[in-house]
Image: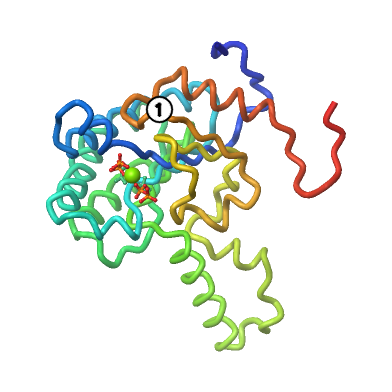
Amino acid sequence: MTERHELDMNRMPEHIAIIMDGNGRWATRQGMERSQGHFHGYRTLHNTVIQAAELGVGALSAYTFSSENWSRPDNEVTGLMDLVVMALRAEIEVMMEEGVRIIRSGRREGLPQEVLGEFDYASEQTQGNDRITLNICLNYGGRNEIVDAARQAAQMAFDGKIAPKEIDENLLSSLMYHPELPDPDLLIRTAGEMRVSNFLLWEIAYSEIYVTQTLWPDFSEDELVRAIAAYQSRTRKYGAVVDEQ
Ligand code: IPE
Ligand code: IPE
Ligand code: MG
């Protein structure tokens, strides 16, 4: 097993994206309600953010609620929204102590006013923190994000600010929800599913992917270190021919 001190500190991923999957299975296996799985998942995220900051990771994007998750039963959706509000309130002190800047990705439309209010408050309070950025992806869809960027580009062209041929990768990248974040170096998915489920479609073009069978509430620092070790063992080629000695 790789220990934390065996990681190459000069090759840390700057940005890790996580599809935190498996809360429901975790709860069901223990005879608990799915909501209990989500609560334990929140505790896991709390721990993971602190561990990532200690390892020198600059940004963590956490898939918390997708644009497709609205199709879940009403009580699960309401429970998740309430959990987000509770967690934001409970965590603000820790985020200040740990130097966590919190930001949100996803459409505002559809989210309860209370959730938006807590996010606006937390983002404002933590905007000066610079140890790690926690990007909470809530009501987030990768296709929505690309559509929203395309609409802005179309509007700019319509207003005569740019010519259509000026719409290129750089312009679209600059119109994504958080262009200040580097693209994720590493995408982790827990609970074994081999799919991206509409997460950061634009940004993960060249991310290294790590899938673990571990369910999100059981994800630990050992797992995080293992994922980073796997990332450090990869050869990133970006389409070029690279000597893999
Ligand atoms: C991930 O866990 C959390 C959310 C999608 C909100 P799930 O709730 O999808 O857990 P499984 O996949 O049912 O086990
Ligand atoms: C992806 O998990 C979304 C989040 C982790 C928030 P899902 O459980 O919704 O994904 P699918 O349905 O298995 O693709
Ligand atoms: Mg799931």
Q: Answer with left or right where residue 156 lies relative to residue 33.
A: right
> Would the CB of label 1 be found within 8 Å of ligand 1?
no
Callout 1 amino acid: Thr
**Residue at x-position 19% and y-position 39%:** 34
Dot 1: element:
loop
Q: Quadrant of residue 157?
A: bottom right
Left or right: 101, with 29 as reference point: right
The scheme the figure's colours follow is: rainbow
Q: Position of residue 136 (x, y in %)?
A: 38, 46
Ligand 1 falls in quadrant:
top left
Left or right relative to 29: residue 179? right
Pointer 1 local density, CA inside 10 Å: few below 14, some 14–19, many at least 20 = some
Q: Is residue 155 at all visible to an observer of this figure?
A: yes
Q: Foreground: 111 or 129?
A: 111
Q: Can residue 92 be seen by looking at this rendering?
A: no
At a point 66% along the width and 19% down the height, the residue shown is 8
Image quarter hosting the C terminus: top right
Q: Position of residue 31 (x, y in %)?
A: 15, 29
* Total marks placed: 1
What residue is at 25 percent from the left and 56 percent from the top? 116
Q: Nearer the viewer, residue 82 or 34?
A: 34
Q: Which residue lies under the disc numbered 1?
A: 214
Q: Is residue 16 above or below residue 50?
A: below
Q: Which quadrant holds the N terminus? A: top right
Q: Quadrant of residue 93?
A: top left
Q: Whole-percent x and y of residue 170? A: 67, 63
The location of residue 211, given as percent across then percent down, is: 50, 35
